[in-house]
């Protein structure tokens, strides 16, 4: 009966440790890299979802800001017309028209808000202290803030939310890249697992391990996040 020749490519039972344990090391690394790949992919998905939420909130805040601006601008135009009409009535009243004086009082009571009233009083005080210039009540800072302050705050909020969403999306994109690199490591380790030459196996293990090591460090630099 003929004897089967031993496989020349198989590691000898008494050979160096790096030959005898290469398969075990490959399997262990496959498990570690697969777990890390799953974690990185999971984190990438969470970051992507958070980014979408922030961008959606930013768009909603931008829409609200635009609405507040249009509302404030509409009131600004109405107040401008009211100021012009009051000025016309005041001129007529100074000329001795009792009707104009009554119309001035009626329009002031109906058409002038508390904010515009304060702006008119402030402008009148400036006119007295500096009679060479006419001071527009609508340039008053408190008046401008009352009309457009809400818009400015909401617009700043929309910009901040967009920046936060972009940052979260960038982190998600980085993790997606790292997931791809870890998949390359899995591919190399998968090839190493079916090879029979320890030297070639170690070359693939070293290459994949180097990629995985760098990618793991970069992944660790991305803060952990949760739903």
Image (cartoon, rainbow, N blue to C red):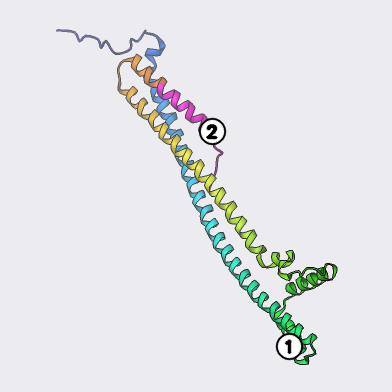
Between 163 and 223, the residue placed more toward the observer is 163
Helix, strand or loop at label 1? It is helix
21 relative to 123, above or below: above
The answer to whether residue 45 of the structure is visible from this angle is: yes
Q: Overall secondary structure of the magenta stretch?
A: helix
Per the image, is 29 magenta? no
Residue furthest to the left: 1
Task: Check disc 2 and report the residue beneath it.
Answer: 220
**Quick one: label 1 or label 2, which is nearer the N terminus?**
1
Question: What stretch of residues is rendered in magenta?
Answer: 207-227
State the residue at coordinates (44%, 26%). 211
Quarter of the rendering containing residue 167: top right
Per the image, is 226 magenta? yes
Inter-mark Cα distance, 1 to 2: 73 Å
Between 141 and 38, the residue placed more toward the observer is 141
User: Residue 103: which disc?
Assistant: 1
172 relative to 117, above or below: above
Neighbour tally class for label 2: few under 14, some 14-19, many 20 plus, Cα within 10 Å: few
Quarter of the rendering containing residue 2: top left
x%, y% of residue 182? 42, 31
70 relative to 193, above or below: below
Helix, strand or loop at label 2? It is helix
x%, y% of residue 47? 50, 45
């Amino acid at each position: 009966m003929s004897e089967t020749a031993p496989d020349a490519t198989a590691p000898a039972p008494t050979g160096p440790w790096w030959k005898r344990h290469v398969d075990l090391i490959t399997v262990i690394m496959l498990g570690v890299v697969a777990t890390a790949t799953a974690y990185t992919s999971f984190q990438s998905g969470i970051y992507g979802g958070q980014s979408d939420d922030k961008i959606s909130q930013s768009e909603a805040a931008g829409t609200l800001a635009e609405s507040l601006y249009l509302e404030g601008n509409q009131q600004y135009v109405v107040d401008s017309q009211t100021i012009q009409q009051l000025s016309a009535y005041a001129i007529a009243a100074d000329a001795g028209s009792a009707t104009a004086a009554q119309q001035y009082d009626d329009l002031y009571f109906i058409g002038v808000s508390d904010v515009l009233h304060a702006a008119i009083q402030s402008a009148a005080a400036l006119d007295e202290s500096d009679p060479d210039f006419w001071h527009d009540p609508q340039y008053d800072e408190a008046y401008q803030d009352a009309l457009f302050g809400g818009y400015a705050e909401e617009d700043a909020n929309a910009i901040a939310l967009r920046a936060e969403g972009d940052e979260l999306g960038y982190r998600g994109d980085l993790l997606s890249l790292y997931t791809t690199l870890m998949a390359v490591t899995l591919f190399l380790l998968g090839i190493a697992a079916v090879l029979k030459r320890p030297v070639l196996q170690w070359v693939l293990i070293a290459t994949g391990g180097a990629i995985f090591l760098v990618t793991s460090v970069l992944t660790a630099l991305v803060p952990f996040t949760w739903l």
